[in-house]
C-alpha cells in the first residue's frame, strides 16, 4: 500500500467506515455552530459533540446537547458518567436522535469533573469503568459503535491495561490523548505508550494531541502506528484546519487568507445567534480571538471586540476589519 493511499483510505470502527482524520471534542468550543463550519471544509470526517453527563442528557438539563444540523453527520455523541443510573435512557435518546457513535469520556482532567469520579478519574477506578462499559454495551446493543477516549492514565500511566480491558468488554475503538491528568494539555506527549496501546489491541486506535499540521501527523504515525488522527485545538477559530491537513496529506496546499478568516468569524457569529438566541454573541467571545490572531493590530482589536455589548457592535467591528484586509 502506498503512503498516499493510506492517508486517503477510510478505516472502520465497528460497521462505521470513516476517513482517518476526525475532529476532537472540545467542551465549550466544538458546539454545533463550529461543527457546521468545519463541515463546510471537511465533508466526510467524523465530528464529535462536547462531553455531556448521562444524567444531564436523560433529564434534559441541557436541551441543546442533542441538537445538531443534519450536515454535521457523521456525528458521535460523547458522554461522561460516574454511575449507571440514567444510562439506558440517555443512550436511547442519543440513538433515537441519530448519532452514529457513542463515546465515553475517560480523559477529562478538570477537577470539577474528576472529583465526582467522571472523566480521567475513571482510569483510577477500573471496576467502575468496566461496569460502565458493560452497561453501555448492553444498552447500545450493537446499534452504533461504542468507543472510549482515554488519557495516558490518571496519576499513573495504565492506558495499556485500560485498553485491553475495554477491548475485552466490546469497546470498538480507543481514542487516546497521551498525557496523565496532572499533565493537563501542555506537557510532553508519550508516543511510546500509544505505540504499546496500538500493539496491545486489535481495535483501531486514534491519536489526539498537538496535531496542528501534516508533519506532526506523519511523525505521530511513524512513532505509534495508530489508525487515525484527531484534530483538536487547531480547529479553534480555524474550522478549515482539518482540510489544510487532509489536503497536505494528498500533496496539496489549502490556505485561507486573513479576509476570509474574518468572513468566517462573521459567519460563525451568525450561526451562534441562530443557535443561542439574542445573547449568542457572548459565547462567541470564546471563539473570536482565534479567528483574528493574524490581523493587523490584533491585540487592540481583540480587547475592543471582547468588550462588545451587542451583536451589532461586534458585527460592525468585524466588518471594518474585513474591509481593512480585503
Ligand atoms: C478547552 C478544551 C475542552 C476539551 N473538551 C473535551 C471534551 O469535552 N471531551 C474530550 O474527550 N476531550 C476534551 N478535550 C481534549 C481534546 O479533545 C484533545 O484530546 C486535547 O485538546 C489534545 O488535542 P489537541 O492538542 O489537538 O487539542 C478538551 C480540550 C480542551 C483544551
Image: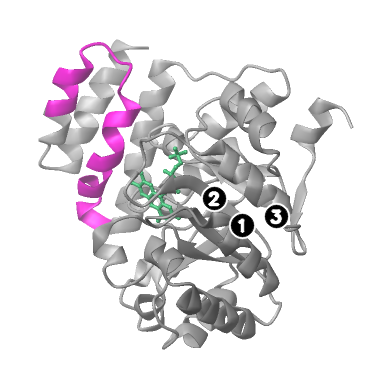
Q: From this view, report whether residue 165 is shown above or below residue 91.
A: above
Query: Can you tell me whether the CB of the residue at mark 1 lies under 8 Å from the nearest atom of ligand 1?
Result: no
Picture coordinates of residue 222 (x, y %)? 68, 29
Q: Looking at the image, can residue 227 be seen?
A: yes
Picture coordinates of residue 28 (x, y %)? 32, 52
Q: Which residue is mark 3?
A: 200
Q: Quadrant of residue 260?
A: top left
As helix, strand or loop, the secondary structure at mark 2 comes to: strand
Which quadrant: the C terminus? top left
Relative placement, left or right, of 146 versus 115 is right
Picture coordinates of residue 65 (x, y %)? 40, 66
Q: Residue furthest front?
A: 156
In the rendered structure, which segment of residues is drawn in magenta? 277-303
Q: Nearer the viewer, residue 69 or 79?
A: 79
Q: Nearer the viewer, residue 94 or 217?
A: 217
Q: Nearer the viewer, residue 234 or 307?
A: 234
Q: Nearer the viewer, residue 237 or 160?
A: 160
Amino acid at each position: 500500500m502506498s503512503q498516499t493511499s493510506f492517508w486517503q483510505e477510510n478505516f472502520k470502527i465497528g460497521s462505521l467506515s470513516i476517513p482517518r482524520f476526525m475532529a476532537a471534542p472540545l467542551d465549550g468550543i466544538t458546539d454545533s455552530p463550529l461543527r457546521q463550519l468545519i463541515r463546510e471544509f471537511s465533508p466526510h470526517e467524523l465530528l464529535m459533540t462536547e462531553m455531556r453527563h448521562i444524567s444531564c442528557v436523560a433529564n434534559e438539563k441541557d436541551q441543546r446537547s442533542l441538537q445538531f444540523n443534519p450536515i454535521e453527520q457523521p456525528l458521535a455523541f460523547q458522554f461522561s458518567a460516574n454511575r449507571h443510573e440514567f444510562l439506558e435512557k440517555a443512550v436511547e435518546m442519543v440513538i433515537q436522535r441519530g448519532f452514529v457513535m457513542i463515546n465515553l469520556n475517560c480523559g477529562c482532567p478538570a477537577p470539577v469533573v474528576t472529583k465526582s469520579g467522571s472523566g480521567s478519574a475513571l482510569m483510577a477506578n477500573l471496576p467502575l469503568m468496566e461496569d460502565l462499559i458493560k452497561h453501555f454495551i448492553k444498552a447500545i446493543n450493537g446499534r452504533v459503535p461504542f468507543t472510549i477516549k482515554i488519557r495516558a492514565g490518571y496519576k499513573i500511566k495504565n492506558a495499556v491495561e485500560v485498553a485491553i480491558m475495554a477491548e475485552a468488554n466490546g469497546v470498538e475503538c480507543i481514542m487516546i490523548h497521551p498525557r496523565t491528568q496532572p499533565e493537563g494539555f501542555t506537557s510532553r506527549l508519550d508516543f511510546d505508550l500509544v505505540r504499546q496501546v496500538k500493539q496491545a489491541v486489535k481495535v483501531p486506535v486514534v491519536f489526539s494531541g498537538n496535531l496542528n499540521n501534516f508533519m506532526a501527523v506523519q511523525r505521530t504515525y511513524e512513532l505509534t502506528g495508530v489508525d487515525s488522527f484527531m484534530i483538536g485545538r487547531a480547529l479553534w477559530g480555524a474550522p478549515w484546519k482539518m482540510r489544510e491537513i487532509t489536503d497536505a496529506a494528498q500533496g496539496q496546499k489549502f490556505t485561507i487568507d486573513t479576509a476570509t478568516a474574518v468572513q468566517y468569524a462573521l459567519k460563525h457569529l451568525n450561526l451562534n445567534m441562530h443557535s443561542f438566541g439574542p445573547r449568542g454573541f457572548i459565547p462567541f467571545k470564546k471563539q473570536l480571538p482565534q479567528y483574528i490572531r493574524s490581523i493587523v493590530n490584533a491585540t487592540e482589536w481583540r480587547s475592543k471586540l471582547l468588550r462588545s455589548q451587542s451583536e451589532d457592535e461586534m458585527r460592525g467591528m468585524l466588518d471594518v476589519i474585513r474591509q481593512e484586509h480585503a
